[in-house]
Amino acid sequence: MSWQEKDNKLTKTFEFKDFTEAFVFMTRVAFIAEKADHHPEWSNVYNKVKIELCTHDAGSKITDKDRKMAAEIDNI
Amino acid sequence: MSWQEKDNKLTKTFEFKDFTEAFVFMTRVAFIAEKADHHPEWSNVYNKVKIELCTHDAGSKITDKDRKMAAEIDNI
Amino acid sequence: MSWQEKDNKLTKTFEFKDFTEAFVFMTRVAFIAEKADHHPEWSNVYNKVKIELCTHDAGSKITDKDRKMAAEIDNI
Amino acid sequence: MSWQEKDNKLTKTFEFKDFTEAFVFMTRVAFIAEKADHHPEWSNVYNKVKIELCTHDAGSKITDKDRKMAAEIDNI
């Protein structure tokens, strides 16, 4: 499944075997986010992680920063 | 601030200095959750972490399991 | 490569692409360890993680607890 | 306790309540390390974390990079 554009955000939901796998994925995303100094809006319930990306500094629109991070996350 | 009861969920938002501090807090909560085999609905944006607790097995109501986890999280 | 038995410990060194990948692996192992209440002696330098397993309660010998954890770690 | 200089490394051992607290501390250090692109040699056994800092690019000596990271870790 690919990222959806909705309400000026890039959105994707990832599903894992269990909570631990989901959280380990989140840890990896956290390192990507911290390195890029670009942070997602995201939520987790058990084995599901929903990520929303937009650039607040650019008026909360989708920018290349978001597309780059989406590609990096897909690359995990 | 204390936990709020809303829509059959215990809810609280935590605020930190920055993203790293917020994520490190989430890591600690993740260990508590995994140990109790009881997992929150939670979301993070930069330095804020919103946690919602309810017991799905009990018909998505607040139970002692949630109150116990809320106390453990406050204890961090 | 398989686990080595040395000095009454099961030992294996894992290598990753970079530090982040190594640390994400460690996070997954940490959850396994915490769940089993059985904790490794381990060290990390950049992209390498060395894990040593033995059971202190059994006189610092290799037990089934260690073999089980070794299998779980290989399963990641 | 302060950092010790030994064998051209800055060394310090941290002790925590339990494994989870130790690993959460390691997570925080991992973010500091990744941000600085300067990574420790470190080991963990249950509630203890031993950190060794030196700069490999400078001939495995202690440099300002190490002193800065030591200060940041103490600051946690």
Image (cartoon, coloured by chain):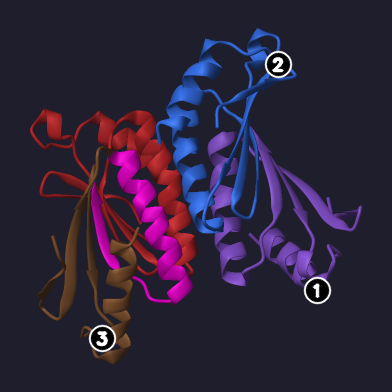
Chain colours: A red, B brown, C purple, D blue
Q: Name the chain under label 3.
A: B
Horizontal side of residue A55 vs A46, given as left or right: left
Residue at the limit of the structure toward the bottom, as seen here: B58
Q: CA distance from mark 2 to mark 1?
A: 40 Å
* Amino acid residing under circle 1: Asp
Q: Mark 1: give few (<14), some (14-19) or many (20+) Cα within 10 Å.
A: few
Residue occupied by mark 2: D8
Q: What's the chain of the residue with tag 1?
A: C
Comparing marks 2 and 3, which lies closer to the viewer?
Answer: 2
Q: Quadrant of the N terminus of chain D?
A: top right
* Residue shown at 40% from the left, 69% from the top: B33
Q: Residues within 10 Å of mark 2 (few under 14, many from 20)?
A: some
At which x and y percent is residue D56? 67, 16
Q: Residue at x 64, y 24 (%)?
A: D4
Name the residue that disc number 3 marks. B63
Q: Is residue A23 toward the left or the right of residue D8 in the image?
A: left
The stretch of residues the image draws in magenta is B19-46
Q: Chain of mark 2?
A: D
| Residue at image location 64% in from the left, 12% down from the top | D57
The type of residue carrying mark 2 is Asn
Numbered circle sitting on residue C64: 1
Residue B54 quadrant:
bottom left
Q: Are marks 2 and 3 on the same chain?
A: no
Distance CA(mark 3)–CA(mark 1): 37 Å
Q: Are marks 2 and 3 in contact (CB under 8 Å)?
A: no
Quadrant position of the C terminus of chain D in the picture: top left
Q: Are marks 2 and 1 in contact (CB under 8 Å)?
A: no
- In the rendered image, residue B34 lying in the magenta stretch gets the answer yes
- Check disc 3 and give the amino acid type: Thr
Residue placed at 17% from the left, 76% from the top?
B9
Which quadrant of the structure image shows residue D3?
Answer: top right
Residue C59 vs residue C4, the one in the foreground:
C59
